[in-house]
Amino acid sequence: WIEAIGWTLVHSLWQGLLIGALAWIVLYALRNFSSRIRYRVAFTALLLIPVLATVTFFRVYESPVAQNTLPDGQLLYMYDHLVTGQISPAENSFNWMALMPWVVVAWLAGAAFFLLRFAGGFIFVQRLRFGAHSKLPFHVQANLNNWMRELRINSKVRIAESANIHAPVLIGYIRPIILLPLGCAAGLPKEQL
């Protein structure tokens, strides 16, 4: 199954490029349509990549029982090789199957690296979130509430200050919080906030 995973990874490269190119063409054609339609097209394209990789894996994977049987063409080749003693061009070609375990190991190493990077970023963002100071002037929260009503945003959005950032930051989707640099709310007129 290692070879099947390796070939799935190799095939997913061209499949992802093809899906990305098609999505780009469709999104370009739909550039004047609503963002909801373009979002659905992009989401569908992203969803197709793992679906195609899964289909590819099951098409490439051969069970151990099937691997022990030789197709007719290979039997004829073996007979021809034993009788004539000639080496076919297939024997001189590069053995891609020998590389598949290394492709899988390289992919796993890359996936582990990016998983650790994501975990580090997540921990950093959580420290920013929970290390924020919520005591801001009243007009700051009032302005935020007015903007939320105008934009028809129904979820609660917190606003706070943090000494660990240098520019305003929005963190979170389910429980969003807007972080302002320390002193930013006090130094700006309420019209600019």
Image (cartoon, grey):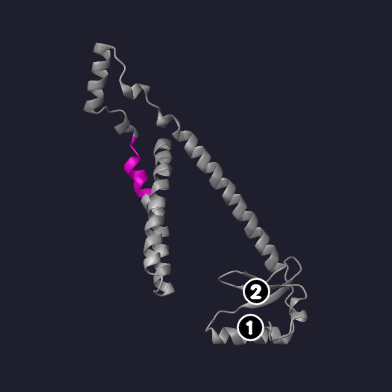
111 and 38: which is toward the camera: 38
Q: Which residue is mark 2?
A: 178
Give x and y (percent) for residue 76: 22, 21
> Contact (CB < 8 A) between labels 2 and 1?
yes
Asked where in the image residue 185 lies, by quadrant, the reply is bottom right
The Cα–Cα distance between marks 2 and 1, rounded to whole angstroms, is 10 Å
| 55 within the magenta span | yes
Residue 159 horizontal side relative to residue 47, left or right: right
Q: Residues within 10 Å of mark 2 (few under 14, many from 20)?
A: some
Of 93 and 162, nearer the camera is 93
- Judged by its main secondary structure, the magenta piece is helix
Where, by quadrant of the figure, is residue 166 drawn?
bottom right
Q: Which quarter shows the N terminus?
A: top left
x and y, in percent, of residue 124 in the image:
67, 60
Could you say whether the residue bearing mark 2 is in a helix, strand or loop? Answer: strand
- In the image, the segment drawn in magenta is 53-63
**Residue 64: image location, x then y, percent:** 34, 33
Kindly state the secondary structure of the residue where label 1 is placed.
helix
Q: Is residue 2 left or right of residue 164?
A: left
Task: Give above or below for 131 relative to 148.
Answer: above
* 156 drawn magenta: no
Could you say which is closer to the camera, residue 30 or residue 59?
30
- Report the disc number at residue 68: none
> Looking at the image, is 83 positioned above or below residue 104?
above
Which residue does the image show at 39% across and 71% down from the upper left?
37
Residues 172 and 88: in front is: 88
Label 1 environment density (alpha carbons within 10 Å; few <14, some 14–19, many ≥20): some
Image coordinates for residue 108, horizontal then vertical, percent: 52, 42
Q: Which residue is mark 1?
A: 144
